Amino acid sequence: MSMNNILFKFFNKYSFLALILLLVPFILYSQDSATNISGVWWRTGITGPPGSNISVIEPRVLSDFGTELMNQFDPIDDPAVRCEHPGAVRVILSPYPIKIEKNISNIIIQYEEWATTRNIPFNNNYLGFAQGEENNKSVMGKSVAFIQDGKLIIKTNHLSNGLGRIKGQFLWLSDKAEIVEEYSTNQDQMLVLRITINDPVMLEKPFIIQKHWGSYEGELLSFDCIDRERPQT
């Protein structure tokens, strides 16, 4: 067999593999570009009063229990009044700046309000309870992140009770609540969040909200809460 025939067979056999290897970096870059949400985000470029960058996609529909509980709610009982952490939904939809960093294994989100940091691992497995963890709950819960259709998806459960406040409307969440966050950027290079709140105790159906931020050149400031205890009578 001539050397030319040997070379022809070699390149014919391995050219497809070589093409794939050449394209892999570009495919990964494309995926990363579609989900490049790192940076500091706030109300930059957004007009209107605070809260105008939040819209309700699917309205809040309370269960019978939820209706009864919220009818009895007094805003002075808001944990934030006592400088107590109000929970995940309140922090995620905070009107103050947030900072997002992404690496190969984690997504890190810092919130100026409540000085909260979430260090979320990338993991495509569903967030089921591990044995012995049923009672291991916290204000920000347990989260995992993954990339799907060019969006960053974060799923959270293992939440303790929290008090959300969405467009001025309060909502207690039970420890059965689950939150799904979908992050992407739009054509104006604004950060877009679609958040779905599922709570079989408080809600009849998923409550879906959308929020968007502009890129912000500043940094997060320190957070100092002012204690506003209920006045003594």
Image (spheres, rainbow, N blue to C red):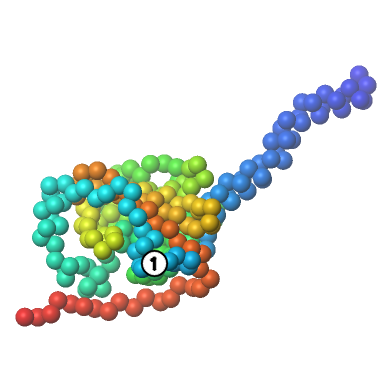
Q: Tell me which residue sits at (43%, 66%) in the image.
A: 47
Q: Quadrant of residue 127?
A: top left
Q: Tell me which residue sits at (30%, 77%) in the image.
A: 225
Of the residues shown, which amino acid type is indicated by label 1? Gly
Q: In the visual, does 16 lie left or right of 231?
A: right
Report the number of discs. 1
Q: In the visual, does 223 lie left or right of 219?
A: left
Q: In the visual, does 64 lie left or right of 128?
A: left
Specify whether residue 58 is in view.
yes
How crowded pointer 1 is (Cα within 10 Å; few <14, some 14-19, many 20+) is rated as few
Q: Which residue sits furthest top? A: 1
Q: Tell me which residue sits at (76%, 31%) in the image.
A: 15
Residue 170 % position (x, y): 22, 61
Q: Closest to the observer: 119 or 67?
A: 67
Q: Closest to the observer: 112 or 104?
A: 112
User: According to the image, label 1 marks what residue?
Assistant: 48
Specify whether residue 133 is in view.
no
Q: Quadrant of residue 109?
A: bottom left
Residue 212 % position (x, y): 43, 58
Q: Quadrant of residue 220?
A: bottom left
Quadrant of the image for the C terminus?
bottom left
Q: Which residue sits furthest left? A: 233
Residue 157 % position (x, y): 31, 50
Q: In the visual, does 226 lie left or right of 31?
A: left
- Circle 1: element type: loop
On screen, 103 above or below 84? above
Quadrant of the image for the N terminus?
top right
Residue 118 % position (x, y): 41, 60
Q: Closest to the observer: 5 or 68?
A: 68
Q: Tell me which residue sits at (22%, 73%) in the image.
A: 81
